[in-house]
Amino acid sequence: MLEYIVTEENFIDVKSMGINSIRLSLNTYKDFENNSHNFGKLDNIIEFAEKKNIYLIISMRQSPGGHNPSNHSGNDGKNELLDNYEDQQRIITLWRTIADRYVNKSIIAGYDLLNEPLAPNSTILNKVYGDISQAIRDVDKNHILFLEGNNWTKSMDWVDNPTDNKTVLSFHFYDPGSYAVDGQGIYPSIIQGQVFNKDALRERLLERLKYIRNINKPIFVGEFGAVTSAENY
């Protein structure tokens, strides 16, 4: 992934499109836990970003034990990170290492702590977020922390109001899931008995924003859209 997929040409392309930031997924924690050589590859990607003045948001897509049961979380069918102390210590250590290495890299906008978590309860989710955040802040007070809602980011009210003043709340917007994720139906139309058009999407988006607005934190929509198999995507 690090050597062949992300190249300097990619940054040239996205710069020509007017893009000013990239959410860069670390697709496997295993690449970095015990291999400093792979950090050198990440350094190269950061250098590409610096050359083109494109901000990076480093996102932890996979984790020890998995933080949701989907295969993209690194442990297909497992969801153990948020209930396993040893796995939590591993991800805390990794984030501290990343933050310590890149504390002075201003082209990095911030760190997205866990991609699409699925926690059993809000207490556990907020404890893990708090522990990771503290480990990062021990070595890096410069960068923004991005906290995603629970249930694949749909439940923003599971995230406690962060006390850190450089924290952003983040969600992903794939609504309705039957169309955007599964590729069923057509836009605009009626899907599962509900109107599906621009106004309906706006209403769903406002509903998702309600809690975040109440606690007055910045918002980042890290992902949105529909699968290409969805008609009129």
Image (spheres, helix red, strand yellow):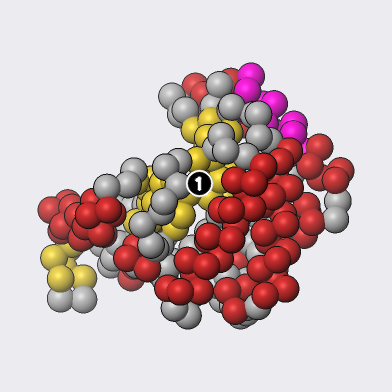
Q: Is residue 31 magenta?
A: no
Question: For the stretch drawn in magenta, what is the main secondary structure?
Answer: helix
- 49 to 68, vertically: above or below: above
Residue at figure coordinates x 42%, y 42% from the top left: 165
**Residue 187 in sight from this viewpoint:** no
Residue placed most toward the observer, 180 or 117: 117
**Amino acid type at image mark 1:** Leu
Query: Residue 147: image x %, image y %?
Result: 46, 54
- Identify which residue, 58 or 5, lies in the foreground: 58
Locate residue 14, reporting x and y percent: 52, 29
The magenta stretch is 41-51
Residue 187 in the figure: left or right of residue 109: left
Identify the residue at horizontal 66%, vertical 68% (top origin). Answer: 88
Q: Which residue, given by chain and number where applicable, does mark 1 sit on?
A: 145
Q: Quadrant of residue 68?
A: bottom right
Q: Quadrant of residue 8?
A: top right
